[in-house]
Amino acid sequence: MVGQGPLGRYGVVLFTHDTGVTTNCIHILFELAVMSVVTLNDPRVKYQSATLNGVEYNYILAEPASGNVVGTIFLIHGWPDMSLGWRNQIPYLLSKGLRVVAPDMMGYGGTDAPEDVSFYTFKRASDDIAALASHLGLSRIILGGHDWGGAVVYRAALWHPELISAFFVISTPFAAPRLTYIDQAVALPTLHYQQQFRTDAVQDYIGLPEAQNATRVRQILNTIYGVRLPGGGSAFNSSGAGFTFELLDEVTEDTPLLTAEEMDYYVENYVSDPFNRTLNWYRTGELNWQDELALVPANASYTAKYTQPALYIGGSLDTALPPVLSTGMETYFNSLSRGEVNGTHWVMWEKPEDVNSYVGNWLASSVLGNVTIGLNLTAASALLH
């Protein structure tokens, strides 16, 4: 006999007196746990902090419930997001035996938000990731990234190749270091919006840093997360001027990609620090280029190849970073796997099963069984307590 108990965090709780059915029920509950998202105050994760190169970082730390850790993966978010943006991936990765670390990046969430733009470069972020790994006692990690987080992942693997065993990136194509500076916000039509983001226009719309308008922050976030105007258009155009501020008052519904509680959490976090600080990531182009001259041979083109296994996942409906921008990436990789999901820039929220499937297959085929890349299996556990 099978009965239905009260609803728990992972769905229906089942009870039975039949051993065979009990086994099936356990499998069902395990699958539900894997599919479930990380929620606010979720007991599966701990929010911790660390001072990294003089800056206070907030990060999520989670260990597999089985206690059988096969490696550690760091997940790096983009804009406008934070560590909770990986809520659909964290349980899945835990089920694969991976310890998960997901920091709030510079300017976001519980991490410091310095005014100086130099704190937001890829080199600085890469060094902070390395410092966090050292803080946790880890000598080898896997990296995953989305949006600006994807750009950071590519660079972290260049600046700290001895640390990064393998990496995956969602949405962001690889752009090689160059001898000459190219402003991508000008050169690539789909990134023209970034010219607006470098100004104070968004902060001016939201209000003064000390008196930010939560309603307007919500409008901005919902618009970026795909909420349309009543007439079907959008108040944001990645290939144009960015936000059309006079249309944002028509954005009155919340995105279906987040729960009401999650949306409130995002708004609260984006109101707590000057919104403009998160946009510093869009203001570092020349600083990144200057840093990366050290990676390019003098008077030569960049020809180095990543030796780590890598995975790129594009969203077929991504208007800012369409998969076509990834054409030719194989030139810079010894082992590049690819995936494409029928979704927008936010495929990890829209189609988490598809994204997780690509990541899981890649982990199984190229990473976890690859004894040559080396995975740091110890450390970190004590820091959970």
Image (cartoon, rainbow, N blue to C red):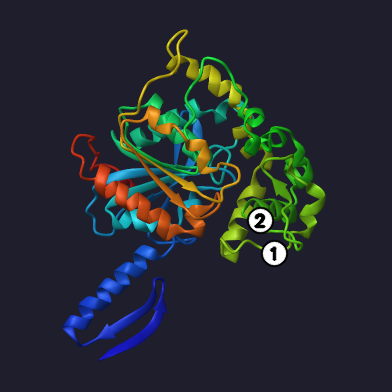
Task: Estimate how packed mark 1 is, as few (under 14), some (14 to 19) or many (20 or more) residues with alpha carbons within 10 Å.
Answer: some
Note whether 34 is above or below 272 in the view shown: below
Up/down of 148 relative to 307, above or below: below
Q: Going by the image, does 235 lie left or right of 333?
A: right
Number of the label disc, if any, that sits on residue 243 = none
Rendering coords of residue 59 (x, y %): 45, 45
Mark 2 residue element: helix
Above or below — where is 83 with respect to 19?
A: above
Disc 1 designates what residue?
253
In the depicted structure, whether residue 292 falls above or below residue 156: above
Seen at 54% across and 45% down, the residue is: 110
Q: Is residue 15 left or right of residue 226?
A: left
**Alpha-carbon neighbours of circle 2 within 10 Å: few (<14), some, or many (≥20)?**
many
Residue under label 2, please give it.
Answer: 222
Q: Please state which amino acid type lies under the numbered disc 1.
A: Glu
Label 2 sits on what residue type? Asn
